[in-house]
Image (cartoon, grey):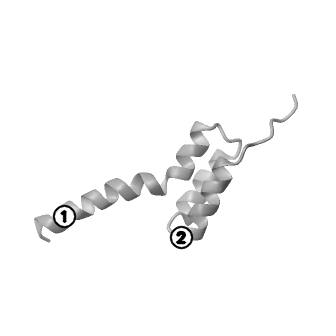
Amino acid sequence: MSTWQLLSMLVGFGILGPVLVLPTLLAISRKHPRMFLIALFNGMFAWTVIGWVALLIWATIPQKKLAP
């Protein structure tokens, strides 16, 4: 493996890694009530474009607060 290939792989993982876990990071930062499920499904379906987009939408839609 050449140095150029190794460098391009590291840059690719450095950019794509955080993008792939973006739905999980958003769910955690927004304290989403289903953040565990979003993280679980993100691990299973983030590699598919449709799954990633669906999780991103799910993580960003406003959640209704439950009455005490």
Disc nearer the start of the sequence (1/2): 1
Q: Position of residue 17 (x, y in %)?
A: 40, 55
Q: Residue furthest left?
A: 2
Q: Determine the residue positioned at 14% across, 66% down.
A: 4
- The kind of residue tagged 2 is Thr
Q: Residue furthest right?
A: 67
Label disc, if present, on residue 6 of the rendered structure: 1
Quarter of the image for residue 27 reads top right
Q: Position of residue 55 (x, y in %)?
A: 62, 58
The N terminus: image quadrant: bottom left
Quarter of the image for residue 5 reads bottom left
Q: Determine the residue positioned at 25% across, 58% down.
A: 10
Label disc, if present, on residue 49 of the rendered structure: none
In this picture, is 50 found above or below 43? below
Per the image, label 2 sits on a secondary structure element best described as loop
- The kind of residue tagged 1 is Leu
Q: Residue furthest top?
A: 68
Per the image, label 1 sits on a secondary structure element best described as helix
Q: Determine the residue positioned at 11% across, 69% down.
A: 2
Q: CA distance from mark 1 to mark 2?
A: 25 Å
